[in-house]
């Protein structure tokens, strides 16, 4: 009698456990949402500081330019995916995309630690004096990673019964934005965004590793997208210099003034002439 009661109780416990697992699997399911971000406005205007009205000052860009390139320090949240090493690799890819431009003398990758010590334009200006920069390109970002259990699980039959491995849907949304500032006037010269979205399915056992790789690769694709957009924005900025006078252009030796805009046009003409020479049959 005792044995029969024990078997009945064991069966009930097994049914309850299975029922709970079934409800957890098909009913609730876990969902984890994590993120990491940095904000250029909060960095330049900390503690709720209100940005000043737009200035009428016209920047004078001394060619070839010395450009600083840096990530805006993160605000809060998990940051394992965007490591210092990965930041350096991503910034180097951007640097390589622009290093051959004739109007750029050099592009310095600024360690994020140099920006963590303070906030605001005063910090940028200190870094600018340290590296002898003309303009600073700040890369901000916002990434949201979501992991959610889903019903499409794997069911394995073993010698002791069924073994279930839950499936997981990993989704990563990444946004990056590069804002280029003229340091002497603190004016925004141009900006370019980049985005990426990825959705992958994996087993729960592999999920942390898969999510980490998805986050890292998403940052890379978003930065590549931003680089393309920045190249387009740069060409548009060149045109606006000539047609709208949004900036003056001077040579590094100090010559320039009202007619210095022609320097930019001369660079473009020189590039066209060189291209025609290369295409000319021998």
Image (cartoon, grey):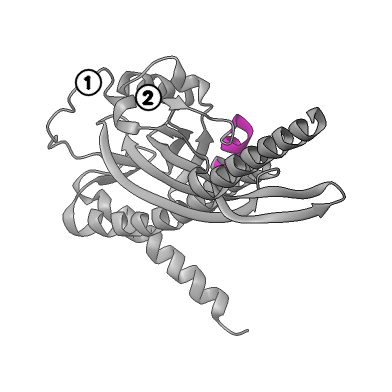
Q: Residue at 50% x, 47% y: name it.
A: 27
**Foreground: 233 or 148?**
148
Query: What's the magenta region?
Result: 83-90
Q: Is residue 125 left or right of residue 226?
A: left
Instruction: Give the quarter of the image for residue 74.
Output: top left
Question: For the C terminus, which image quadrant?
Answer: bottom right
Calculate the distance from the C-alpha at mark 2 to the C-alpha at mark 1: 18 Å
Secondary structure type for disc 2 = helix
Question: Nearest the camera: 217 or 171?
Answer: 171
Q: Is residue 147 above or below residue 129?
A: below
The answer to which image quadrant residue 40 occupies is: top left
> What residue do we see at 27% from left, 39% from top?
188
Asked if labels 1 and 2 touch by Cβ distance under 8 angstroms, the answer is no
Q: Which residue is mark 2?
A: 124
The residue that label 1 is drawn on is 48
Coordinates of residue 82 in the picture (x, y in percent): 56, 35
Residue sitting farthest toward the front: 1
Q: Which is more N-terminal, label 1 or label 2?
A: 1
- Would residue 189 be found to the left or right of residue 228 on screen? left
């Amino acid at each position: 009698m005792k044995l029969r009661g024990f078997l009945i109780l064991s069966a009930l416990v097994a049914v309850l456990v299975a029922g709970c697992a079934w409800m957890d699997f098909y009913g609730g399911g876990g969902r984890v949402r994590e993120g990491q971000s940095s904000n250029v406005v909060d960095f330049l205007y900390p503690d709720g500081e209100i940005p000043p009205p737009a200035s009428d000052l016209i920047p004078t860009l001394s060619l070839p330019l010395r450009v600083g390139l840096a990530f805006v320090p993160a605000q809060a949240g998990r940051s394992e995916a965007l490591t210092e090493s990965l930041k350096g690799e991503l910034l180097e890819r951007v640097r390589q995309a622009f290093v051959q431009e004739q109007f750029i003398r050099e592009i310095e990758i600024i360690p994020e630690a140099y920006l963590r010590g303070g906030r605001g334009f005063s910090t940028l200006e200190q870094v600018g004096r340290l590296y002898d920069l003309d303009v600073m390109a700040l890369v901000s970002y916002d990434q949201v990673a979501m992991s959610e259990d889903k019903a499409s699980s794997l069911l394995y039959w073993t010698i002791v019964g069924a073994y279930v491995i839950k499936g997981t849907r990993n989704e990563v949304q990444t946004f990056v934005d590069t804002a280029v500032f003229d340091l002497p006037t603190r004016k925004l010269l141009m900006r370019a965004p980049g985005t990426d979205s990825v959705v992958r399915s994996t087993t729960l056992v592999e999920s942390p590793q898969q999510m980490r790789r998805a986050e890292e690769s998403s940052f890379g694709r978003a930065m590549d997208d931003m680089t393309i957009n920045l190249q387009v924005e740069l060409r548009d900025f060149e045109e606006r210099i000539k047609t709208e006078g949004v900036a003056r252009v001077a040579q590094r030796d100090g010559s320039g003034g009202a007619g210095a805009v022609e320097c930019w046009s001369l660079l473009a003409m020189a590039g066209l002439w060189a291209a025609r020479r290369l295409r000319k049959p021998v």
